[in-house]
Image (spheres, rainbow, N blue to C red):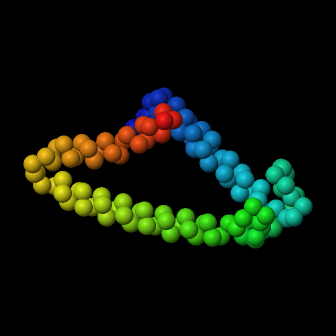
Amino acid sequence: MKKRSLSFYLLAAFFGLFILFLYGPMITIFILSLQGPDGALTFPVRSFGFYWLGQVFQEQRVGNFVEPFQRSLVLGGIVTGLAASMSVLAAMAFRQRFKGSTVLFYLTIASLIVPSILISLGL
C-alpha cells in the first residue's frame, strides 16, 4: 500500500469539515423535527414523533406547502428535460467542424460561465 503524504490527510480533514458545515445544520434540523408536539429546537430530544413533519403538510396561515412543492417539481423536470435535450443537440453539433464552430463553441461556454460570475458579483 502506498504511503500517503501529510497534505493528503490535511486535505481530507478540510473536506470532512466542509461537508460537516455544509450538511450538519440540515441534518440537525431534520433530527430535531422528529419530536412530539412538546418538542422544540432543543437538545436533548424530549420525545420521538412525526408531529412537526406532519405540520408541514397541513394548511398554514402563511400558505400551503404541497402545491408550491409540486409546482417546483414539475418546473424542475421541465427545465432538466430542456437542458438535457439542448446539451445533447449542442454536443452533436460540436462533433463536426463547420464554419464558425469555434466562435459558437466559445459563446456557448461563455453563456454557462457569465451568469454565475454576475451572480457572484451581485450585479
Residue 36: which quarter of the image? bottom right
Q: Position of residue 104 (x, y in %)?
A: 21, 47
Work out whether 101 lies above or below 3. Answer: below
**Count of marks overlaid on the render:** 0
Residue 14: which quarter of the image? top right
Left/right of residue 65 with respect to residue 72 in the rendered view? right
Picture residue at 84% right of the left edge, 50% below the top: 42
Picture residue at 34% right of the left edge, 62% below the top: 84
Picture residue at 9% right of the left edge, 48% below the top: 99
Left/right of residue 84 with respect to residue 7 in the rendered view? left
Q: Which is more toward the observer, 117 or 24?
A: 117
Is there any visible trace of residue 76 in the rendered image?
yes
Picture residue at 36% right of the left edge, 41% below the top: 113
Work out whether 23 lies above or below 13. Answer: below
Q: Which is more toward the observer, 109 or 27?
A: 109
Left/right of residue 21 with respect to residue 55 in the rendered view? left
Q: Which is more toward the observer, 2 or 5?
A: 5
Q: Position of residue 74 (x, y in %)?
A: 50, 69
Is there any visible trace of residue 9 in the rendered image?
no
Residue 1: which quarter of the image? top left
Q: Position of residue 110 (x, y in %)?
A: 31, 42
Give the residue at the far top of this rendering.
Answer: 6
Give the residue at the far right of this rendering.
Answer: 38
